[in-house]
Image (tube, grey):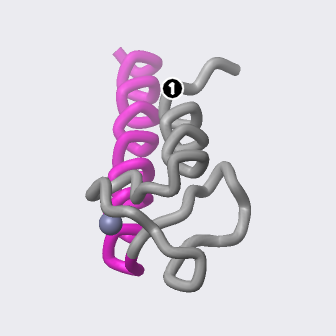
Amino acid sequence: MADTDENYILDAWEKRICPTCGAIIADERAYGSGRIKDGRFCSLACYGKYHEAAIAKRANEALTKARRKVN
Ligand SMILES: [Zn+2]
């Protein structure tokens, strides 16, 4: 599955920048689940912000699909 969000996360991981705010991340200050695909963030706030947006986007897509089925 081609997922540009995931590519962005991987790119940010390699460059050691926060995917949300673009700050440089020191290893001892990284926040995340530990899985590369979930990303590495400079703070818990940035982690929450990014995943909140991803969850909202997925929820919107699911809602749109559900509406199409109904109509
Ligand atoms: Zn950040």
Residue 70 in percent (x, y) is at 41, 21
Give me the residue at 37% from left, 60% from top. Answer: 52
For ligand 1, tell me if the residue under mark 1 lies within 8 Å: no
Residue 40 in percent (x, y) is at 54, 63
Asked if 46 appears above or below 6 in the picture, the reply is: below
- Where residue 44 sits, quadrant-wise, is bottom left
Question: Seen in the image, is 8 located left or right of residue 48?
Answer: right
Answer whether residue 27 is magenta in the image.
no
Q: Compare residues 42 and 65 and report the one nearer the observer.
A: 42
Residue 2 in percent (x, y) is at 63, 18
Give the image quadrant in which the ligand numbered 1 is located: bottom left
| Extreme residue toward the left, this view | 21
Q: Main SS of the magenta segment? A: helix
Asked if 52 appears above or below 31 in the picture, the reply is: above
Q: Compare residues 60 and 16 and report the one nearer the observer.
A: 16
Answer whether residue 45 is magenta in the image.
yes
Q: Amino acid at mark 1?
A: Thr
Q: Compare residues 45 and 17 and report the one nearer the observer.
A: 17
Task: Name the image quarter holding the N terminus.
Answer: top right
Label 1: how many residues lie within 10 Å, few (<14), some (14-19) or many (20+)? Answer: few
Task: Name the image quarter holding the C terminus.
Answer: top left
Residue span colored magenta: 43-71
Asked if 60 appears above or below 32 in the picture, the reply is: above
Location of mark 1 (residue): 4
Asked if 21 appears above or below 68 in the picture, the reply is: below
Give me the residue at 41% from left, 45% from top. Answer: 59
- Secondary structure at numbered mark 1: helix
| Extreme residue toward the bottom, this view | 28
Give me the residue at 57% from left, 31% from top. Answer: 7
